[in-house]
Structures are given as structure tokens and as C-alpha cells.
């Protein structure tokens, strides 16, 4: 899981998740961290720092993780009413064929059925049960 400072305002950046993915770990751990953990520190930021955190392009780490990270961040940005940064549109952040993150066929089917548009668009279909319970929704 990406290290977060006690002071969330200073420690959260989308690029942190790209760094975490590049460093390794198990595929399931890396792929679960993005939808489960990313919305929480993002939601805790004041609006101006949310937008700044989105503007930092995440370094490329591999086709699947790049697509999943872009989908999650785009999803969170839309839920919070932020403009979508240009780096989300880089071709390397899209998969040619949809990929169900879970290897379990039932979960993969649920992922395809209940995926938010951003996940469908990027081709990375995360398990809806793995997403933070707020799904990145603003509680304001």
C-alpha cells in the first residue's frame, strides 16, 4: 500500500500509486490497492489539493495497472466534479480488450455488469466489492 503521511494534504499524490505499482508486490495486492485505497485519502483533501493531486501524471508501470489506475482516478475526478487531466487520454492508459481484474469468473462477471463507465472506457474492470465503500463519492 502506498505510504501516506499523517498530513494527508502533503502526502497524497496519484503518482504515489504508480510508484507503488512499479515497486512490485503481488498482482492481487497491487490491483486491489488502487480501487480500495485511493478514494479515501483523495476524499480527505480540500478541493484545491484534490485538483492538484489529479494533475500529477502517474508514471507508467504496465498496461493493466496503468489502465486500472487511470480508470479509478478518472472515476474519482468525475464524482468530485473535477476536470479530467490530459494524461488520462494517453493511449497507454487504455487496454485493447477488457480485462476483469479478478480471476474468479463470478466476480469478473459482476465487474463487467456493474462497472462504472470510466472502467469500461479504460478496459480495466475492477471488482465492485473491492472499491472503497464510498466508491470515492463526496460526502459533502
Image (cartoon, rainbow, N blue to C red):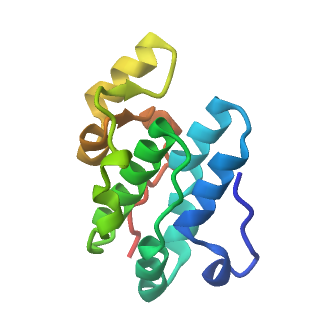
Identify the residue at image location x=50%, y=23%: 102
* 21 up-or-down from 54: above or below: above
Identify the residue at image location x=24%, y=42%: 121
- Occupied quadrant, residue 59: bottom right
Identify the residue at image location x=52%, y=38%: 130
| Residue 13 locus on image (x, y percent) | 57, 71
| Residue 137 locus on image (x, y percent) | 38, 61
State the count of labels. Answer: 0
Asked whether 25 or 90 is in front, the reply is 90
* 89 up-or-down from 104: above or below: below
Identify the residue at image location x=49%, y=75%: 53
| Residue 104 locus on image (x, y percent) | 50, 14
From the image, which quarter does the C terminus lie in?
Answer: bottom left
Please, which residue is most extreme toward the bottom here?
48
Left-right relation of 8 to 99: right
* 103 up-or-down from 32: above or below: above
| Residue 115 locus on image (x, y percent) | 30, 36
Asked whether 35 or 122 is in front, the reply is 122
Amino acid at each position: 500500500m502506498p505510504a501516506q503521511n499523517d498530513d494527508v494534504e502533503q502526502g497524497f499524490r496519484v503518482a504515489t500509486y504508480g510508484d507503488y505499482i512499479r515497486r512490485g508486490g503481488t498482482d492481487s495486492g497491487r490491483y486491489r490497492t488502487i480501487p480500495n485505497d485511493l478514494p479515501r485519502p483523495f476524499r480527505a483533501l480540500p478541493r484545491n489539493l484534490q485538483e492538484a493531486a489529479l494533475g500529477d501524471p502517474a508514471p507508467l508501470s504496465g498496461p493493466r495497472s496503468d489502465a486500472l489506475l487511470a480508470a479509478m482516478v478518472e472515476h474519482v475526478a468525475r464524482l468530485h466534479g473535477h476536470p479530467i487531466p490530459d494524461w488520462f487520454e494517453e493511449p497507454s492508459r487504455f487496454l485493447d480488450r477488457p480485462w476483469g481484474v479478478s480471476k474468479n469468473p463470478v466476480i469478473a462477471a459482476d465487474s463487467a455488469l456493474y462497472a462504472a463507465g470510466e472502467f469500461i472506457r479504460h478496459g480495466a474492470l475492477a471488482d465492485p466489492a473491492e472499491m472503497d465503500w464510498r466508491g470515492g463519492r463526496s460526502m459533502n
